Image (cartoon, grey):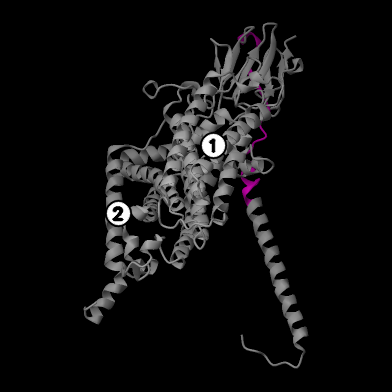
Amino acid sequence: MTEHPATEKREKSSFGLILHLHPRKVKRSTLRFTLTFGLGGMAALFVVIQVITGLLLKFHYEPSPESAYNSILNLQESLLFGKMLRNIHHWSAIAFVWVAFLHMLRTAFTGAYRPPRDVTWITGLALLLLVVLSNFTGYLLPWDQLSYWAVTVGTSLLSYIPLAGEPMRKALLGGAEVGQPTLTNFFNLHTGVIPFMIIALMAWHFWRIRRAGGVIVADKDKESPMVDTRPHLVNREFVVAITLLAAIFIISSLFDAPLRERANPAFSPNPAKAPWYFMGLQELLIHFHPLFAVFIMPVTVLAAAVWMPYIRSTDTNHGKWFLTASGIGSAKLAAAAGLIVTIIFITLSEILPDPEALLPGLPPLITTGLVPFILTAGTMWLFLNYIRKRFFLNRSELIQSVIVLLVVSYAILTVTGIFFRGEGMNLVWPWNL
Amino acid sequence: MKERTTDKPAEQQNGRRNFTRRLWQILGVVALAEFLWFIISLLRPSKETHKSRPAESLRVIGNVEEFPAGSVTPDRVNRLYIVREKDGAFLALSLTCPHLGCSVLWNEETQQFDCPCHSSAFDRRGVVLSSPAPRPLDYLPVIIEEGQVKVDMTGVTRRKRFEPNQLTYAL
């Protein structure tokens, strides 16, 4: 730097916060867009957008079943940019879930979950859950048919968790069904407790990234020269942020956030669907007993994700999307298998008679729970064994293939739930919906 | 930490220090438990009590003649269905699907209750025809008095199967 020391000092202070979050210098190799796709930064920006738009919405929202719906109508119809404000909050919330999820996939693929980044990975998982929870609690607030039934279904899922489930559901609802206490609870969680937890966890998440020496890079890029954070990193972040904001603004001015009729506890809309990010779970519920669909399967996946950093592996899958060509081949095969098997599974369960008709006299926990679960888990185990041997995979690559398989299967379930389930949750073509 | 000069032996000093540290830890755990208990009790019963009204638990649904034999009549306000068997017996079924809490719909053509959320189906007595519902629709006790059909709203009962004692006959 050849600038006058005083100028330099003044400029530095105006960037104080940014330089506080970033190190002063970063490796040039970490600046490559395709290494991270800027997803973590986008997620951080969404927190800012949601806090600002959320605080503004709070000026007009009334959290009671009598007036909540009307306050939203009033906001949309008689307030300058009221509709725009709600649209931005709505579409950002959806994009936030996407971005957070993709960010998780990126860290998983590039092996950034291994120690010393294990705590970053686990706080990241917690943040993803909080983002989904934040979405879900916000879903109830408009108090329309969509929110009322999505939350009825969503909270009923809890009652299938053994022992703790029913007390948890009662505590969350503040009663036996969705009503004023539920709205009070959800409003407080959505506008107070969860944002606070997200911001606190974010600080920890960021601090652990700093401590691990910044973004993960491949071994060959370890020796890359250091460059100043400002302008090199800050300018790039600014471009991503501005582009993202523009995209959100365009989407929000073109598409309105949905608002159905006022909530009516006597009539479920047909079909009654959960929020979109739970549609995969809802689809799973059509095929599996709730104990398996909402407890055993999600808890297994979550536990595996938390345990993932500590699975021993000889290789160092750092900063690269794929380690070897056979790793790519295996991931492709896993994706194809997930796609085809899930589609076949859904179609078969539509054509074949219900499991309780095939195995009469047995409790539903076995016929619709244990039997399909063992079949699914067994098929998956055989398949993983096969690809491990065929592609000579190491642990990291095997983990990657499992992730690909699960993500593709869940994506198919979600797409089926959203686009292929019509009246009575029967399979239909999307154009007949 | 600076070393402090005392004339007591080091061992005794450490013992005391450990004891105080342990005491702090125990106090910390106790304080945390109290705090958690406070939060849980705050979440749990409070709000339900001030809203719940003891109101008459016995609701009049209608006159006996309003329910022809073999009919299924919804009562949206009380969130239940009144089923009348061919032989004139009454059965009150909860509208809430035992799977995930959606409101089931009566389909006159197929003579079954359909759940719009996860495509569970029940026959006219509420018994599961197709999964994922894990048990039949809950039923409520029906009382016939002076030609009126009344339902005890507090008596929502879970069941495993249909049994004749769930029916009420108009005398």
The label on residue A383 is: 1
**Residue underneath mark 2:** A240
Q: Can you give x and y, in whole percent of width and height, for residue B126 in the image?
A: 65, 19
Q: Can you give x and y, in whole percent of width and height, for residue A141 in the image?
A: 46, 41
Q: Which residues are magenta?
A: B42-66
Question: In the figure, A233 relative to B110: above or below?
Answer: below
Number of numbered discs overlaid on the protein picture: 2
Q: Can you give x and y, in whole percent of width and height, for residue A199 in the image?
A: 46, 58
Give the residue drawn at x 65%, y 51%. B40
The answer to which of A9 and A29 lies nearer the viewer is A29
Answer whether residue B104 is magenta in the image.
no
Specify which label sits upstream in the sequence, 2 or 1.
2
Q: For this view, does A412 lie left or right of residue A229?
A: right
Q: Type of residue at label 2?
A: Val
Q: For this view, does B162 lie left or right of residue A289?
A: right
Label 2 chain ID: A
Label 1 chain ID: A
Answer whether residue B62 is magenta in the image.
yes
The label on residue A22 is: none
Question: In the figure, A307 relative to A386: above or below?
Answer: below
What is the quadrant of the N terminus of chain A in the image? bottom left
